[in-house]
Amino acid sequence: MQYVLSFMKAWSRLLLLCAFLSVPAASFAQAATKPKATAPAAAPAPAAVAPAADAPPSTEAAPAADAATAEAAPSAPDAASPPPDTRGLDQEVQGLKKDVVDLNRELFVLEEELLFPANTQVAVFVSMDVGDFFALDSVTLKIDQKEVINYLYTPREVEALLKGGVHRLYLGNLKVGKHELVAFFSGKGPNDRDYKRGATLKFEKGIGAKYLELKINDRQRKQQPEFEVKDWE
Amino acid sequence: MQRLCLAAVTFCAPAMADTSYPLKAHEAPDFALHAIAGGNVRLSEHRGDVVILSFWGSRCTPCREQLEALNRTLATYRSAGLQVYGINVDDDQTRALAYAHGESVTFPLLLDPEKSVSRSYQVDNLPMTLLIDRNGVVRNVIRDYNAKSEELFLQQLRALLNE
């Protein structure tokens, strides 16, 4: 319930921020267009009014003033008014964008906490070391004899694993008690032959979150890959 | 005025034809499939490229013609950031493999034996070709292949590559 409330609060904050973001964006657009539209009308006013005040009131004075405004209009803004300083506004928009990104992250964490609470959460990771004897193609994961995921690895992903990356293969929920995990690894083994091996782990899920790691290592002595499931305590 | 009407018809006609495709203007569903030549391909890894997905069957003659045309297109626009994938929807994969080994198509031909990708893209015709922009959004679909549709397709592709 607490998660739901905080989730909803975060959402409402995000919506409010989005509303605020749209206002500066609009004012920014106005600020950018304003000098062109309004400044010419304001700037030539004194020049146009002064001769009209000195001259005797007549019917010809008004058209003369209009003509003066029309002539002065295009040239005045370039010389008189400096370009508007929008740096402050830009910084404000950047700050708001950062707030949105932070809120989005907060929402993501809350969503995960809501969908996968710590007392039922189980996460399975894949890591790979060296990889001389095995080129990973896919991993099929079964928990309690039920297939939960079959993941195909692209060459880029394999490269990332070989560089030390760890891939979160599965995130789900399990009730407290004993469970069995079976992982099937397929790919190319030594001498470029099709290779498929399995690894099993029986584990007990406690109250806290459970983290398991599927490790692929090279066993130099046997010239074979080795697959192991590690339980992170 | 006549030119304006002609332009309107030219631009509106394909749009009207594609309105029935529900994934148009939506994010393309991500997938990972085995390639016949080896390795796996994941669509989301190609964000930033314009991607053409062509669903084909080995018994479909226009599909083969289109694959050959796409091969020529790829040769022209590869340097501009174009990726082409042919997704085979055959039940019997041996025919697809025979075709792949016999033809000189340079882009990856992918296998979808469980039809999961075909289902997610709601393939209702063969050949069916999708144009996906650099942001991963489905921009257009072509359900029938002929010289006229190919010309139109190339126009749309050029526009996407210029975006």
Image (cartoon, rainbow, N blue to C red):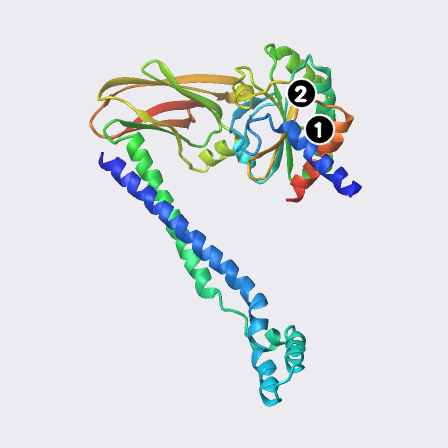
Image quadrant occupied by the C terminus of chain A: top left
Question: Image height check: is A72 above or below B138?
Answer: below
Q: Name the image quarter holding residue A82.
A: bottom right
Tally the marks.
Answer: 2
Give left or right: position of A168 versus B61.
left
Residues A29 and A173: in front is A29
Seen as rendered, the residue at the extreme right is B2
Residue drawn at the location 33% of the way across and 44% of the way down: A12
Whole-angstrom CA distance, mark 1 to mark 2, is: 12 Å
Image quadrant occupied by the N terminus of chain A: top left
For discs 1 and 2, the disc positioned in front in the rendered view: 2
Residue drawn at the location 33% of the way across and 24% of the way down: A229
Residues A35 and B109: in front is A35
Number of the label disc, if any, that sits on residue B162: none
Number of the label disc, if any, that sits on residue B127: 2
Residue that mark 1 sits on: B70
Q: Chain of mark 2?
A: B
Give left or right: position of A107 versus B40.
left
Q: Earlier in the sequence, mark 1 or mark 2?
A: 1
Amino acid at circle 2: Pro
Q: Are marks 1 and 2 on the same chain?
A: yes
Q: Name the image quarter holding residue B77.
A: top right
Q: Name the image quarter holding residue B110.
A: top right
Amino acid at circle 1: Leu
Q: Residues within 10 Å of mark 2 (few under 14, many from 20)?
A: many
Question: SS for tag 2?
Answer: loop
Give left or right: position of A133 versus B160.
left
Q: Residues within 10 Å of mark 1 (few under 14, many from 20)?
A: many
